[in-house]
Image (cartoon, rainbow, N blue to C red):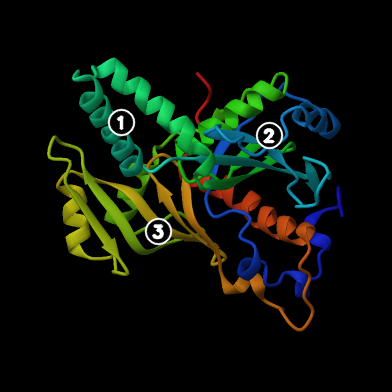
Amino acid sequence: MSGRPLEWLPTQLRVNLWERVAVFKNMIVYRLAADWTATLAQVEASLDSARFAECGPSQERSLGWVEPRGEAHGPLVEAVGGQWVLKMMIETKAVPAAVLNRKVMDQVAHIEATTGRKPGKKEKRDIKEELKLTLLPMAFSKQVAVTVWIDPTARLLVLDAGSQARADEVVTALVKSIDGFAPTLLNTVTSPAVAMSEWLVTQEPPAGFSVDRECELKATDESKAVVRYARHPLDNDEVVAHVRGGKQASRLALTWDSRVSFMLSESLQLKKIAFLDVVMDGKGDRKNEGFDTDVALTTGELRRLIPDLVAALGGEAPLA
């Protein structure tokens, strides 16, 4: 299926992806430089030296690249319909603070009882670090995977990251591994906060979009007051009064083309992405649970949504 246009997929195969695998629940979008022309093989070779390895006994954190298809020893970059998909795994181990502090207090008490002296701050810090190393082999680990999508034709990098800090971590790893890779956050002429506030006041969302029943409004003055609406109509005088009174929309639930719903944030992040019933039209007894179909359907929808959203925000701002 690699390299084939998305449109060839039979309608009945646009099926229950959303019930099985949400390839993207969140989106943070970056623009790739026009002069970045690395090939799929070059990216694969660049990532190979940074494959994921689980944390060692006394290691608190480990990150690296894993096979996006989930098959051991497979490629680290998969091409589906011209779209490249990668996956970063991040593993962390942590000793509960309460447990560590209690152990430190016990050790300090033992020193006081046996030597008659009270350990100073530096000694306490050293004790804490030693105890942490001792307890880490017994700590549970937590693994989080971040899906990465590169659209080489549209020059976009999209991360399924729930926070900017997590996205920064993944981008840093990409920049270290791939020569000449220097993405910049997508920026629009009109800020999302200004645009979303205007849509709420005028009750006129941009063409192709509709406003749903959830938003967050934040005061721009020193009060930092916040008003949240959930499962609540937003086309009312109360919402308008909040905006005209100095609050701006920091989050707003939207639906695009009656196909994809999401929460747009003031920092141009998309959260709570969900694909609606119309996307699954034609679903019957035939089911294709393959990785390729999951990726093709997801990226096929989102690569149309992104330019429409950018246009709704006044277009892409030129790089400084």
Between tags 3 and 1, which lies in front? 1
Disc on the earlier residue, 3 or 2:
2
Badge 3 density bin: few <14, some 14–19, many ≥20, Cα 10 Å: many
Residue type, mark 2 in image: Arg
- Calculate the distance from the C-alpha at mark 3 to the C-alpha at mark 2: 27 Å
Q: Nearer the viewer, residue 230 or 248?
A: 230
Query: Count of labels shown?
Result: 3
Residue 13 lies left or right of residue 159; in this view the side is: right
Q: Is residue 177 above or below residue 55?
A: above
Badge 1 density bin: few <14, some 14–19, many ≥20, Cα 10 Å: some
- Calculate the distance from the C-alpha at mark 3 to the C-alpha at mark 1: 52 Å
Badge 2 density bin: few <14, some 14–19, many ≥20, Cα 10 Å: some
Q: Is residue 52 above or below residue 257?
A: above
Q: Is residue 247 above or below residue 110?
A: below
Disc on the earlier residue, 3 or 1:
1
**Mark linked to residue 253:** 3
Secondary-structure class at tag 1: helix
Secondary-structure class at tag 3: strand
Residue 197 lies left or right of residue 226; in this view the side is: right
Tell me residue 243's x, y (percent). Answer: 21, 50
To which quarter of the image does residue 233 belong? bottom left
Task: Determine which residue is flagged by label 2.
Answer: 155
What residue is rendered at 72% in x and 21% in y? 35
What residue is rendered at 18% in x and 63% in y? 237
To which quarter of the image does residue 230 belong? bottom left
Task: Determine which residue is flagged by label 1.
Answer: 107
Disc on the earlier residue, 1 or 2:
1
Residue type, mark 1 in image: Gln
Secondary-structure class at tag 2: loop
Residue 162 lies left or right of residue 298; in this view the side is: left
Tell me residue 217's x, y (percent). Answer: 25, 50
